[in-house]
Image (tube, rainbow, N blue to C red):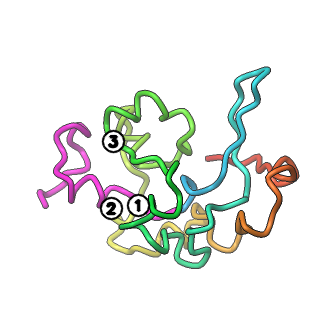
Amino acid sequence: MRPRFWELPLKELTGDEWEALCDGCGKCCLNKLEYEDTGEVVFTSVACKLLDGDTCRCSSYADRHDYVPQCVVLTPAKIRKVGYWLPATCAYRLRHEGKPLYDWHYLISGDRDSVHHAGVSVRGRTVNELSISEDDWDDYVIEDQS
């Protein structure tokens, strides 16, 4: 990968560089609710059934669509359409908005666990969607979506 590739426009990244941009926070794997009457999107602490709550990584990333067909494949083009539901700390969203990565991002810090040490990940703060009825997700709305 190229030095400081994360500073390039997203559309110029190679596939490996694109994948490397993910900070591993796990927030994109939280189920969201969109209220029809207001259009507001809120995050819940209800995680996708494939999210490993300790590592904040997908337990079946390569074949996740076999288990979760609606899982979004994020691309530079899709960020323009769905970026509003990405967390404010997300490297993809930050770079799409022309902002720098945070110091805790592993590409800056050199430490994959820095996202967890900074308290930015969802490690230890989720419930698996298989254990909660979708009708009850309103009870799991979280306020801090950054």
Mark 3 vs 1: CB contact within 8 A: no
For residue 71, side relative to residue 78 (left or right): right
Check disc 2: other Cα within 10 Å, few if <14, some if 14-19, many if 20+.
some
Q: What residue sits right under mark 2 in the picture?
A: 108
Q: What residue sits right under mark 3 in the picture?
A: 75
Residue located at (22% from left, 37% from top): 11
Q: What residue sits right under mark 1 in the picture?
A: 105
Along the line of sight, the residue nearer the viewer: 58 or 102: 58
For residue 93, side relative to residue 145 (left or right): left
Mark 2 vs 1: CB contact within 8 A: yes
For the residues labelled 2 and 1, the Cα–Cα distance comes to 5 Å
Residue located at (79% from left, 52% from top): 134
User: Which image quarter: residue 106?
Assistant: bottom left
Residue located at (42% from left, 41% from top): 94
Q: Amino acid at mark 2?
A: Ile
Check disc 1: other Cα within 10 Å, few if <14, some if 14-19, many if 20+.
many
Q: Nearer the viewer, mark 3 or mark 2?
A: 3
Q: Considering the image in quadrants, where does the N terminus appear?
A: bottom left
Element under disc 1:
loop
Query: In this figure, what is the number of numbered marks?
Result: 3
Segment colored magenta: 1-25
Q: Nearer the viewer, mark 3 or mark 1?
A: 3
Element under disc 2:
helix
* x and y percentages locating residue 28 in the rendered image: 54, 52
Q: Which mark is residue 20?
A: none
Q: Amino acid at mark 3?
A: Thr
Check disc 3: other Cα within 10 Å, few if <14, some if 14-19, many if 20+.
some
